[in-house]
Amino acid sequence: MLKVHRPIRIMLDMDGVLSDFTKFYLTAAHKKYGTPLVPVVTHWNYSEAGIGLSHEMSMEVWKTILGIENMWESLKPIITEEEKEILRDMIQDPQYEFYAVTARPQTPGRSVMLQCYHWLEQYIGKGISVVPRRDKVKACKGLDIDYAIDDSPVFVKELMEGEVNVYLRDQPYNQEVEGVPRMYSLKTFLELIQEESKLALEQEIE
């Protein structure tokens, strides 16, 4: 049930929802081990994605990229220009509050929080609060989140079990996830929120 007397609070995951970490990782693996630059991976664990990485090799790629200064600022966006505009409009609307809750590990350079802020400001603009937190359930509960979107099978399962109103951002590596609304674009997710908030407001007026 929406609480229309305060802003609607929305949690956005970053990697796989806003930014393209998978392509960055695959490029790093290709440079290190010559693995193929496949267009998609079908498993969230890269050592099980069928691209020729053992568990040890996968960990070495992680070690390499997490040694890059301010690495999180260098990722490319996966959101479209239209989705950026919808986000910007909603950020300016006082009935919405946005939070980027991320489990990203630290790299050399600026803090994870600052790297996320710089990335968001570059590609979307100001107005999204960043919350670096591994326990996304506690983060969402503490923020009293109304809507959440994530691509990770692990985090989505935790959020579902924590009774957070979570939506799954469809990706090739999360096709086995069931029992959660699947969003095939961020636009669809944002438009759903706009429509439901409009209906809630109309019901209150009546």
Image (cartoon, helix red, strand yellow):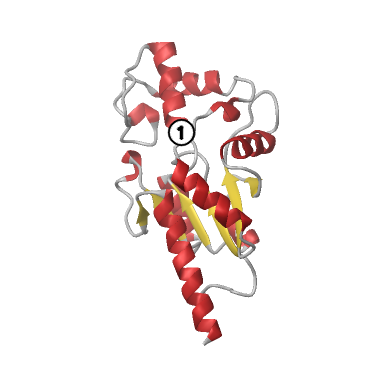
**Residue 199, position as x, y percentages in the image:** 47, 75
Q: Is residue 138 visible?
A: no
User: Disc 1 marks which amino acid?
Assistant: Asp
Q: Position of residue 19 (x, y in %)?
A: 49, 36
Q: Looking at the image, which residue is at 55% across and 57% down?
A: 10
Going 47% across and 23% down the picture, which residue do you hit?
59
SS state under label 1: loop
Name the quadrant containing residue 112: top right
User: Considering only vertical position in the picture, is 87 above or below 59?
Assistant: below
Residue named by callout 1: 20
> Which quadrant of the view contains residue 46?
top left
Looking at the image, the residue that sits furthest to the bottom is 206
Residue at 45% across / 67% down in the picture? 195
Image-based side of 105 in relation to 150, left or right: right
Q: Residue at x 37, y 27 (%)?
A: 47
**Left or right side of 88 for 33:** left
